[in-house]
Every structure is written in structure tokens, then in C-alpha cells.
Image (cartoon, grey):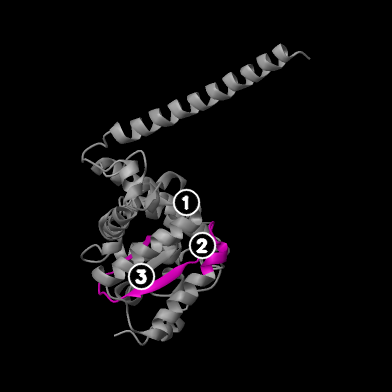
Amino acid sequence: MSSIQVSKQLLTRWQSWRRRWVYALVSLTVALGLIVATPSPGHAQAPLLELLLRGVQIIQLSTLSDRQEVALGKQINDQLLSSEMRLSNDRQTTAYVDQVGQGLVPYSSRPNLPYTFQVVDSDQINAFATMGGYVYVTTGLLKAADNEAQLASVIGHEMGHIASKHSLEQMRQAALAQGITSLAGLDRNTAVNLGVELALRRPNSRRDEFEADQEGLATLKSAGYATSAMPAFMEKLQGQASLPSILSTHPAVSERIQTLNRMIDPATANSGFGLDSRAYRTEVSSLR
């Protein structure tokens, strides 16, 4: 090969290499320009580059892994316990609730999460959950339940919300509505504060409630509890003079009861365990 041909080949390779790097540099410049220049809806928000330079943790809710969800749930739980509610110091009852909850975990559709079941010291009849496997029931609810199967039905329902990732979806929608998210994602501290607000005061949608009921009923049945307990507890609470907190923000309670009854075979509704009221009262007897 002549020196001229070698020179031409080297020149061709150099031109090709240079084009690739120029295109890459242009693409990167355009991408950063879009991120920096694009305003977030509603409120002014720091661009991605500035957030990264400040060391702010950014999370992308649409691609959150199980590990990241658990970590975010723990931060939400820590803030709830530090400022919003007080846990019961009744070790016997807390251990019992955890035992019932952990017994349901293998039968849920997300059994690999490290679930945490906690008892909130409150006379309100309520239960709620946040992402990452955190479930809360109040002492008021424990007193109102007739048996373990009714308690398990409530815990199973809250686990259904976690299994279906309802908290994550609510957070995403709320962040968009409030204009506190951007192309980069959501500031972790903002996400935690929003998660606390959603856990305490955000009603679930009609679709979410039906989905959590369906998930909870399937878990209850697979774990061996009497499935009649789920609609029975709702009927009991609905008959009270004032609607308890657990139902007051939930839509169409009577319709939920009817839907559950349609899903339950009357011939086997009372088959299974957890209907012994005396045994249940013994387990929660230390509640005052």
C-alpha cells in the first residue's frame, strides 16, 4: 500500500472519529440546555444541574425500585412517628398485631417487602399504610373489632394498597398537581413531606379501595381466615352513630360491602379460623 493510500485512510478515520465526538458533544449540550431552561409547572424549581451540585437527592417515582421504596417509606414512617402520632406502649398488643400481620405476608402479592406493623395510640377507629410495607392500626380499631379475622381483614386491605403501589401513584399525581416535580424527578425531602400528608389526610380513590379490598380478601382467604369477617366488620362500623375515620374518607362503603359479598362464596364464608371472639379479647385485654 502506498504512502498516499495510508494517509487517506488515516484522514478518513480521523474525520469519522471527529464527527462522532462532535455529535455527542452537541447532544449533551442540547440535553443540558433543555433541563436547565425548562421551567417546572406551578412553582419555580432549581434545575437538575444545580440540584446535583447542591447534593440534593432526586428520586424518580416512575422507576422507583423496591429497595428505594422501602427506604422512602422508612423516612416517611420516621417523620410520622416524630411529629404526627404516638405509638402504643402496650407490648403485648403490639406483638399480637405484628404476629397477625406477619402471618399474612407470605400470602400477599408482594411478600418480599420487609413489612412493619404498628399500633397507634388513638381512640379513633382507623388504619392506614404507606409505601415500603408500613401498616398502622389504632387502638380504637383494635377495641372495635370482634375477632382476629376482622383485624386481619383490615390489615390485609392496607397491605393491598401497598401491593398495588397506591401511595406511589398518589404521590406522583399530587406532585404534578402542585407543580413540585420536574424532568429530573422529585426532591427526596419534598417526597417525604408529601408522603406524610398523603398517609394521614389523603382519601383513596374509588378504584384504589376496590382494588385493595380485592387484594385483601385474596390474602385473607389464602391465609386461612374466614372471609365473612371483611364485610362483617365494615357493616358493624357503618352502623355506628358517626362514621369512623377508617370509612369516612372512603367512597361508597355500602357498594364495597356488596362487592365483597359477591366475591365470597356463602357456603365457605365462615370456613377458616379467626372468628373466636373470646380468644381475641384475651389477646387485646391489656388495652385500656
Q: Position of residue 232 (x, y in %)?
A: 40, 64
Judge by depth and name the residue closer to the eye, 104 or 82: 82
- Residue range highlighted in magenta: 104-130
Q: Does residue 49 sit above or below 98 in this rendering?
A: above
Q: Which secondary structure, mark 1? A: helix
Q: Does residue 148 sit above or below 252 in this rendering?
A: below
Judge by depth and name the residue closer to the eye, 148 or 35: 35
Q: Name the residue under label 3.
A: 137
Q: Residue 262 carries which label?
A: 1
Q: Amino acid under label 2?
A: Leu
Q: Which secondary structure, mark 3? A: strand
Residue ranking furthest to the front? 3
Q: Which mark is residue 113?
A: 2
Going from N to C along the chain, the mark reached first, 1 or 2, is 2
Q: Position of residue 286 (x, y in %)?
A: 35, 87
Judge by depth and name the residue closer to the eye, 202 or 45: 45
